[in-house]
Image (cartoon, helix red, strand yellow):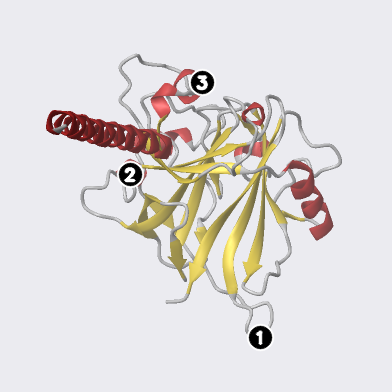
Amino acid sequence: MKNTNAAKTRWLIIACVGVFLFDSLHLAMGGRARQEDETRDLTRTAWKEKRKGAAADALPVRYKIIQQMPKGTPAALVAEDSEIGVTLWRLRTVRPQDAMEIREIVQHAKGGPKEQWTPERVAADTAFVEKQMARLSIESLRAGFLYVINRTKYKGGTYGDPYLIFPTQQIYDGDNKVEAGRAIQIPGPNEEPFTVDRSEARPNELQESEELIILVTPQTLQNFPVAPPDRQKLSQESVENLIKQYAASYEVAEKIGSQGQSITIREKQASRTAEARLLTNDPYPQTIYRLAAKPGEAMLMKFEIKVVSK
């Protein structure tokens, strides 16, 4: 009887140890899986192949997923090329080590002093203080035609008048074709950057952000302004119709370790003309939006430049 009990005890200990080891291995594997789910390597995706000059030895470009695709989104809705890249640039005062080629000359008032500034990368959710300056670079993995609409968003949930700010004749002579490697700069390379202010729609309704509606379509939009000379006012109804027709859910991934990095000479050069292109080994967009859009469909997303008081 004693021997039987001893044997049972040994088997019970072995079983407990086995369960513990299995659970530990499962947790470790689950942790790795979660870590893999939370990060992406852009050099393993279509970005590497779509940009020209693909290199086999391209260094890994890691992104942290900060907003997951909504649960239940069918995989068939997410195409390999349904991604839009946005880089938000904040202009800071120049430093001695900044190359002359990346500096911007800004003249806020006609006849006023000219100042030098350097664009640096910031995360998409960065809040801008009043009077700070900003630019965006937009790149689409899917070839098509880019439209950008700007409207002020207020805390009370209201919006200011919407304006088509791209395409216009002021930027790349109205050429709004987009593809991987073409970094379209908003405002244009020959225009002053955004200067962030906080306007007030009504009492107690301060500005919350500048909302940019970014739309990539497979063909040019019909019954829509065709590259007007300058930004053009649109009706709220037409904008809401576009959102209703094309908006999709999306995942957001932020590039790891690049916030605060100055714009490179290659990035600066690629934004100057409609013909210039970024190559595989050039920096990738700061923020990647992966949309639930089938091949050949239009892609629409909203991007906000947040505004806070000093």
Q: Position of residue 142 (x, y in %)?
A: 61, 27
The mark nearer the N terminus, 1 or 2, is 1
Other residues around mark 3 within 10 Å, as few (<14) / some (14–19) / many (≥20):
some
Amino acid type, callout 3: Lys
| Along the line of sight, the residue nearer the viewer: 15 or 235 | 15
Sequence-wise, the earlier of marks 3 and 2 is 3
Q: Residue furthest top?
A: 56
Q: Which residue is mark 2?
A: 258
Distance from disc 1 to disc 2, alpha carbons, whole Å, reads 39 Å
Residue denoted by label 1: 203
User: In which quadrant of the rendered view does residue 30 lie?
Assistant: top left
Q: Residues within 10 Å of mark 2 (few under 14, many from 20)?
A: some
Q: Which mark is residue 256?
A: none
Tell me the quadrant of the picture where the N terminus can be found: top left
List x then y, in percent, for residue 21: 24, 32
107 in relation to 302, above or below: below
**Residue 300 visible in rendering:** yes
Residue marked by disc 3: 50
Quick check: 307 above or below 28?
below
